[in-house]
Image (tube, helix red, strand yellow):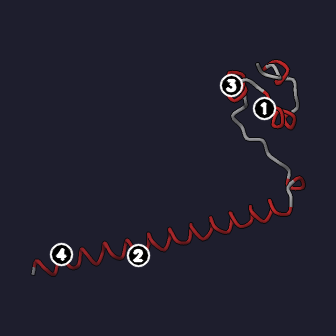
Amino acid sequence: MSKLSFKEFMKLSEKEKCKKYKDLSDNDKFLARISQPLSPIVIPEEELTKEQKEKIKKMKEDAKTLEEMEKFAEKHIAKLKEMRKMIKELEML
């Protein structure tokens, strides 16, 4: 038996819902998940801890590095394709 009903759960603030989710029955957890809006909840940056801010900064840096690596790879793949084409042309001579 759940400690909290779905109706009671839906009356809670978003913060309280996060804390009380575990008190729902499996069926009510399912209902809670499908009842959530599709838009993400934005957490103001001032509410983040220093550790969370550093983690986000690192993720952004990693994303930039990955983007640079993809551009580098695309550039060199294009060059390889050109070279293969030239080799085929030479083999035909």
- CA gap between label 4 and label 2 equals 18 Å
**Relative depth, front residue between 93 and 67:** 67
Q: Are marks 4 and 1 in contact (CB under 8 Å)?
A: no
Identify residue for label 4.
88
Nearest-to-viewer mark from 3 and 4 = 3
Query: Percent x, y for residue 56?
Result: 74, 61
- Is residue 10 found left or right of 86 in the rendered image? right
Query: Percent x, y for residue 71?
Result: 50, 70
87 relative to 8, above or below: below
As helix, strand or loop, the secondary structure at mark 4 comes to helix
Query: Percent x, y for residue 41?
Result: 78, 41
- CA gap between label 1 and label 3 equals 10 Å
The residue under label 4 is which amino acid type? Lys
Q: Quadrant of residue 15?
A: top right
The residue under label 2 is which amino acid type? His
Identify residue for label 2.
76
The 10 Å Cα crowd at callout 2, few under 14, some 14 to 19, many 20 or more, is few
Identify residue for label 1.
21
